[in-house]
Amino acid sequence: QITLKESGPTLVKPTQTLTLTCTFSGFSLSTSGVGVGWIRQPPGKALEWLALIYWDDDKRYSPSLKSRLTITKDTSKNQVVLTMTNMDPVDTATYYCAHYFSGAWGNWGQGTLVTVSS
Amino acid sequence: DIQMTQSPSSLSASVGDRVTITCRASQSISSYLNWYQQKPGKAPKLLIYAASSLQSGVPSRFSGSGSGTDFTLTISSLQPEDFATYYCQQSYSTPQSFGQGTKLEIK
């Protein structure tokens, strides 16, 4: 059974850096074809894809946010970390991590709401 | 970047109705199209992958079709638990993108 869970701060101040950790079980991020990524959803709005890291450490980012995002993995800990710099109130959203395989996001974490406010 | 446009944005229907939601890509994405269901306060759930393949555990009343730029999600007979928001998503190229969502409400 695949499970994922996001952890990190629920409140950050403008200009601060957000660090989110996705801890997963039920699969290995060293298995060929597997990826873990991040998708966010502002309150009442649509889903927005942010970043994806593959088993071979290939990394993909949303071009509009690429300068602010870094995604890394720790295969031994079954964790993926997303950092987003220079946070702004428009970045207030629920952040989801998810398992990616065969071109689809098959399993999602419960999400974590991050509010950006001074 | 590939834009995904869903129609309608909202839809009212009754239990037992047949419902179709459309998703159009701004350029050809072959069959790299997925459908998700999201209920309030919950994470999205994968329903259909690769345009027409039913995810394990998803009821057979859900089906998907299409290729290239035009895709549809059909629910053959609406059940009470199907009232939710539905999103299409392309995985053909980076950046991946989602449609704006279709909110399915009870009539």
Image (spheres, coloured by chain):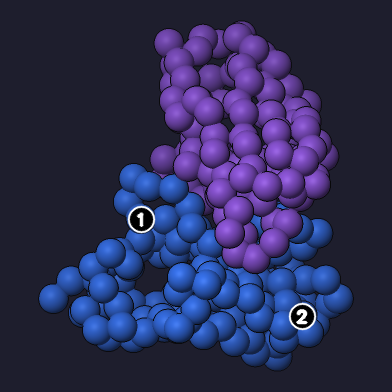
Q: Which mark is residue A42?
A: 1
Q: Looking at the picture, how far across and down is residue A100, in whole percent?
A: 71, 64
Please tell me which residue is depicted at 77% across the width and 33% down the height of the picture: B66
**Badges 2 and 1: C-beta atoms under 8 Å apart?**
no
Q: Nearer the viewer, residue B82 or B64?
A: B64
* Gap in angstroms between the C-alphas marked 2 and 1: 28 Å
The chain in purple: B
The kind of residue on which mark 1 rests is: Pro
Disc 1: host chain: A
Q: Nearer the viewer, residue B74 or A108?
A: B74
Please tell me which residue is depicted at 46% across the width and 70% down the height of the picture: A64
The mark that comes first in sequence, 2 or 1, is 1
Please tell me which residue is depicted at 72% across the width and 83% down the height of the picture: A58
Q: Looking at the picture, how far across and down is residue A18, in whole percent?
A: 36, 81
**Where A100 falls versus B73 (above or below)?**
below
Disc 2: host chain: A
Please tell me which residue is depicted at 60% across the width and 26% down the height of the picture: B21
Q: Quadrant of the C terminus of chain A?
A: bottom left
The kind of residue on which mark 2 rests is: Trp
Q: Looking at the picture, how far across and down is residue A44, in whole percent?
A: 34, 45
Which residue is labeled 2 in the image? A55
Horizontal side of A91 relative to B102 (left or right) equals left
Horizontal side of B4 relative to A54 (left or right) equals left
Q: Quadrant of the N terminus of chain A?
A: bottom right
- Colour chain A appears in: blue
Q: Looking at the picture, how far across and down is residue A46, in whole percent?
A: 44, 48
| Extreme residue toward the right, this view | A32
Mark 2 residue element = loop
**Can residue A59 be seen?**
yes
Horizontal side of A112 relative to B59 (left or right) equals left
